[in-house]
Image (cartoon, helix red, strand yellow):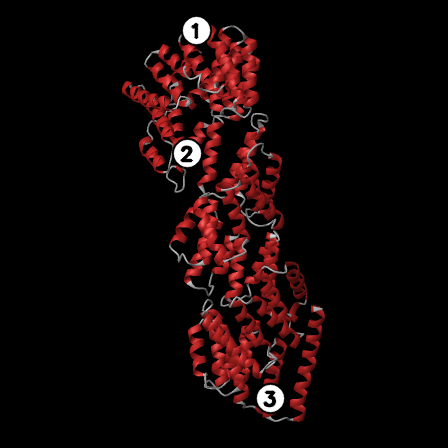
Amino acid sequence: MIKRAAQLTALAAALLAAGVTLKIVGERRTRAAALATAREHASKGDAAELRLAGDVLDAAIARDQQSPVAEAERAVLRAHLWLEFGERRDLAEAAIAEAPADAEPTRLAQAILAFGDADREGAAAILAELDASQDPLVRTEATWLAGQLAISNHPDDDDELERALAAVDAALGESAANAALRRVRARLLLQLDRPTEALGELERARELARAHLGLAADEALFNALLGREAAGVASVADQLLEVGEALPLRDRHNTLLARAVVHVRAGELDEGLTRLEEAREGIPRWDRLAVRLAIDTALEAGAADAADAWLDGADLPADEIAIDRAWMTYVRGDVMTALEQLAKLPQEQPRVAYVQALALVEQRRFAEAEPWIRRVDELLPGRIEIEVARARVELRTGDKTVALRKLQALAEEEPYSPRAWTGLGEALLLQDGEVDLRKAKQALERAVEREPLPAEAMLLLAEIADRRRARDPAGMTAAEQLLQRAVETAPTLPRYRERQVQLWADTGQERRAFAAATELVEVPGVTADTLVRYVDLAAALGERDVDAEAVLERARALGAAPNAIARARARMLLVGSDKDDVVEAQRSLAAIVQQDPVDIDARVLLAETYVRQFDRKAAELVVRRGFPPTPDAQQGRLFFAWASIEARMGKPKVAAPRARSAFVRLLDENRPAPELLVAGELAARLWVRQDNERIAMTITDQLTERLPWSAEAWTIRAKTELGVGEAAAARTSADRAIALDPDSARAHEIRGHCLLRFGQKDKARAAYERAVELAKGTRAEKDYRENLRRL
């Protein structure tokens, strides 16, 4: 239907132009008749009729040589044709230059060009000069331009918009079929939040001008803006875009914008952003409705750069641009900076509340987000992203079951809404009772496929992969890869790097975790848990130069648990051998254990303070007193501490079975890799000393089966194999460790021992030298140099 209308329009325009020109030239019609004919065409207000009106005036001017009235009217019509339809600004400028400068139509043409150049004050000043004009053409064109000015100057002032609407209604009383007036009337109604009336006005205009394709483009644009009739918008837009040059340039770009909106809301982001970029070339920056829709669409698609391009030169209020900048910052993942930007903006602005609500939920400040969500409901009702945010808040602060039902419905009804699938995956993981990991994983995988910045979904998928680490060691590798993708997706949000630190710390990659934590310590938004973990890692690695007190004070201010802070401080005190530090740590830990007898970490550390004071009996007593209050399923660390003390007391026959029991319990408890490594090494070493290679090898087999990605696990296995005389197997294990971590000094040392067993002295020397190089500055360097000396 649209294509047929375009064909008829083109044919009629060609025939009419030819006929009019022949009449003027052939019949030598009077100047007045030519002007009347031009005005008759202009009064219809569509592109074809405006072109014809200009052609009529061209012919009349060519015939009469001098025709100031025709020249002035041609100027205003050519200016109108450029502003509304985007056609030939050069013709408009030439027509204005040839017309008498002081004629009312010429002045109005200048006002139209000034408006198009974003000189709204200049345009308004000229309109004020023409307020008393008696020329019907000038009055009609001035009313049309005044409507455009009202929308640009006073988009939120209902009184000004109503005055402009009343003026348009009065003008339509004289020129009811004028499509340009009806288009601006529809825009005014839309700006007044009367969308049904606006669409009705377009429908009436189409009845009066069936061949006016711009009205169909407006209808598609309005429905796209209102989020209505997505299939209809797509169909109309596709048909309009097929008609080629029959669709005026400005209307073509509005149609591209409408199609882009539907693509984005259907999750077709690449297609949508391509259309959006095509539209940007032709939509003027003074068209606030179109520019606002384009920016919002780009941001909904997670395309901050595209939004930035639309903002360049946009004729929007400063506050509105600042809100867009904050939204762009949020979309880029820098939630903290976005919240800082929003705090400086007028808080009564609806879009400030909108972005604030989303940013607070993204930062997991659910209680703070709730009032902002309520405010958005009042000011911008029906936003799907806010519905998702509300359900995520409900999940954390209210009824989990209700939240799950809401998120299931939202994911099904709005499958491409940002965070809908992430929220559903979250809800499935947080339900009480048995968690359906399969369904949660499916939801989160859809989030990764469909959301523009699915960092949170990647993190949750990493946690699912990490949950199966005990059954499937490949889960750790998958978790590590997913977390890296999350960090790359949202590099400015510390949450994902914090989770990386936690994973690396739990999997025995303490040095890597400490380096990453060091970068996070001063980052705004870092959590108290990460600050405490940073100090714990420093203690584990013997990094005494860190300002632990300052970091822990910040952790306290951020709400860290007092006992966690006390344990971290005690660990740092135990890094050295200062007796006063040991006593201070002992005093602090004893208070924790007395307050909470089930605090296993504090109890184990307290026992260590007694060992440091050579009071192993007291250390053993502290550990044994921890068994009665501690559930059986959590006693692995106590058994390991007890075995360690017994080993130091010279009781290997008692310590060996207890160490094995501790290791098995820690495996069952799925404890972090650092605990499994030290427990496995102790147990294997004790059984090697008991000449029970079968049990020793069983322990190291279990260790590498659980931690196949750990170079340290393979190093322990290699050392054990070497200890029981399996030099070939030890060399294989050492090679495996070096492949996983080429900078493992222990692995190179053990490889050197293996090579020496096979008589390969030169290769052994190279391995020892590499071990010395890697251990430079550490306590182990002296031992590795001794290996070289013995060669």
Q: What element carries label 1?
A: loop
Q: Are marks 3 and 1 in contact (CB under 8 Å)?
A: no
In the rendered image, is residue 766 in sight?
no
Q: Is residue 123 left or right of residue 469?
A: left
- Which comes before the other along the chain, label 3 or label 2? 3
Look at 52% across and 38% down and name the residue there. 459
Look at 53% across and 11% down and name the residue there. 696
Look at 61% across and 94% down and name the residue there. 30
- Which comes before the other along the chain, label 3 or label 1? 3
Look at 61% across and 85% down and name the residue there. 40
The percent coordinates of residue 188 (x first, y second) are 52, 71
The percent coordinates of residue 780 (x first, y second) are 40, 18
Query: Cα distance, mark 1 to mark 2?
Result: 38 Å
Reading the image, the residue beneath label 1 is: 651
Q: How crowded is mark 3: few (under 14 residues within 10 Å), some or many (20 or more)?
A: some
Quadrant position of residue 668: top right
- Which mark identifies residue 36? 3
Q: Nearer the viewer, residue 737 or 525?
A: 525
Q: What element carries label 2?
A: helix
Which amino acid, by three-letter code, is at mark 3? Ala
In the rendered image, is residue 224 in sight?
yes
- Which comes before the other along the chain, label 1 or label 2? 2
Reading the image, the residue beneath label 2 is: 529
Q: Nearer the viewer, residue 505 or 596?
A: 596
